[in-house]
């Protein structure tokens, strides 16, 4: 769905959607990262790096995917990282 008005370009809507998705998911991720980092600092740091890189590549894929209608790995690595942190 379009988040602004009908005259707003699709590129802007895609960028805004990724930004809103990131701001919705970051608080819970930071909580789990902090909680696991207390007991397991090295795995938590690696998981944090994987999460951030997954978000970056997922965002780039989402920006480009609408033109090609092919989605590139939309945050699968990010959710694996959160599951890793919950298991620590």
Image: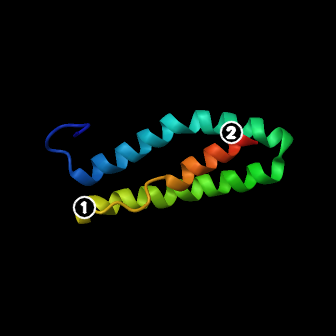
Residue carrying label 1: 69
Left or right: 81 in relation to 41? left
Query: Splitting the image into 4 quarters, where does residue 4 fall?
Result: top left
Q: Compare residues 29 and 14 and report the one nearer the observer.
A: 29
Left or right: 37 in relation to 76? right
Q: Compare residues 76 and 23 and report the one nearer the observer.
A: 76
Q: Residue furthest front?
A: 87
Image position, residue 60 (x, y; %)? 42, 61
Q: Compare residues 88 and 7 and report the one nearer the observer.
A: 88
Q: Residues within 10 Å of mark 2 (few under 14, many from 20)?
A: few
Q: Is residue 64 above or below residue 26?
A: below
Image position, residue 38 (x, y; %)? 83, 39
Write the residue at 51% across / 57% down: 56
Write the residue at 66% across / 56% down: 49
Tag 2, which secondary structure?
A: helix
Residue carrying label 2: 86
Q: Compare residues 18 and 80 and report the one nearer the observer.
A: 80
The quarter of the rendered structure image containing the C terminus is top right
Q: CA distance from mark 1 to mark 2?
A: 33 Å
Q: Residues within 10 Å of mark 1 (few under 14, many from 20)?
A: few
Q: Is residue 8 above or below residue 72?
A: above
The quarter of the rendered structure image containing the N terminus is top left
Q: Nearer the viewer, mark 1 or mark 2?
A: 2
Image position, residue 20 (x, y; %)? 42, 39
Write the residue at 67% across / 47% down: 84
């Amino acid at each position: 769905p379009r988040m602004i008005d009908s005259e707003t370009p699709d590129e802007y809507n895609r960028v805004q959607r990724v930004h809103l998705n990131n701001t919705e998911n970051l608080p819970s991720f930071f909580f789990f990262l902090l909680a696991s980092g207390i007991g397991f600092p090295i795995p938590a740091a690696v998981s944090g790096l994987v999460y951030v890189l997954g978000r970056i590549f997922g965002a780039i894929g989402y920006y480009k995917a609408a033109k090609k209608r092919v989605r590139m790995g939309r945050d699968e690595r990010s959710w694996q990282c959160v599951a890793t942190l919950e298991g620590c």
